[in-house]
Amino acid sequence: MISVKDYIVLITGASSGIGEACAKVFAQAGAKLILAARRQERLEQLAEQLGKDYGSLSYLMPMDVCDQSALDNLPPPWSNVDILINNAGLSRGLDKLHEASIQDWEEMIDTNIKGLLYMTRAIVPGMVNRGRGHVINLGSIAGHQTYPGGSVYCATKAAVKSISEGLKQDLLGTPIRVTSVDPGMVETDFSMIRFRGDAERAKKVYNGLTPLTPDDVADVIFFCATRSPHVNINEVIMMPTDQASATLLNRQT
Ligand code: 8X3
């Protein structure tokens, strides 16, 4: 196991859910965090809490991953990112493809694919120059199995899978590591966002089963980041014990 003390860890979508859980676990281990998300207020609260709980130093980046130039002004030494956690992502709707909103597609494709690509393109050249780094992408079981109403979301996560594989291939010969962590059902505001604030519908998603928590996923991400430098965990598929596939669930109702 390696230490991430004083490593610079950039987390996108850091203001809630899996991103926030990652911030805590890496802060506890002594990493310095760049917290990126759209909601500045949430980032400020999180940074304050991390400072209080772990004496952690954070650099806040209120930004949208869809903004190609968002990382242009990272001041040194914060620009020397050691670990990039491409966590920002979202789903919108669960409608049949031929009835779905094109705007929903644009949002998912822009954030989940293009946003991840922009962040990667901005950060990885520095990793290559410095000869150290690790990119950790948040995929999903949705990238392995398509489910009804989820085709575009699933396609974006299948793209993350391909991008992770391709980046690993392109970085062969460098010490840079690439990992994709692909969870199933995790209880975050994922479903609230998918259903645009319909709390009742969102709650039903987790009815009668025990989903993963953001901490469960952050724990696995931290594990991947702390292996010996010669070890690359390429892909982790994880789901709750109550889940066997995107659509096979054990609900006790
Ligand atoms: C989240 C998992 O199965 O709800 O990416 O799409 S799923």
Image (cartoon, rainbow, N blue to C red):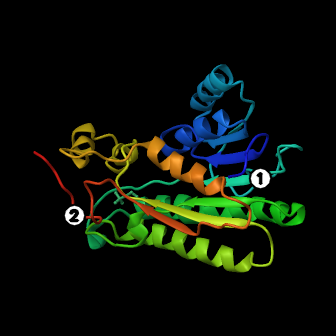
Q: Residue at x 65, y 54 (%)?
A: 225
In the rendered view, would you say 133 is above or below 60?
below
Q: Is residue 161 visible?
A: yes
Residue 125 placement, left or right of 87 = right
Q: Of 78 and 52, which appears nearest the observer? A: 52
Residue 97 spot, x, y in % from top left: 30, 71
Q: Residue at x 52, y 46 (%)?
A: 219
Residue 41 spot, x, y in % from top left: 59, 27
Q: Residue at x 62, y 22 (%)?
A: 53
Residue 239 placement, left or right of 169 = left
Residue 162 placement, left or right of 225 = left
Question: Does any atom of ligand 1 lie closer than 8 Å to the CB of label 1?
Answer: no
SS state under label 1 = loop
Check the image and name the residue furthest to the left.
253
Q: Residue at x 67, y 61 (%)?
A: 135
The image quadrant in which ligand 1 is located = bottom left
Can you tell which quarter of the image residue 210 is in? top left
Q: Which residue is mark 2?
A: 248
Q: Is residue 102 visible?
A: no
Can you tell which quarter of the image residue 46 is in? top right
For label 2, the crowd category at 10 Å Cα-Cα, with few meaning under 14, some 14 to 19 and many 20 or more, is few
The three-letter code of the residue at mark 1 reads Asp
Q: Of 235 and 77, which appears nearest the observer? A: 235
In the rendered view, would you say 205 is above or below 238?
above
Residue 175 spot, x, y in % from top left: 79, 68
Residue 74 spot, x, y in % from top left: 82, 46
Check the image and name the residue furthest to the top.
52
SS state under label 2 = loop
Q: Which residue is mark 1?
A: 82
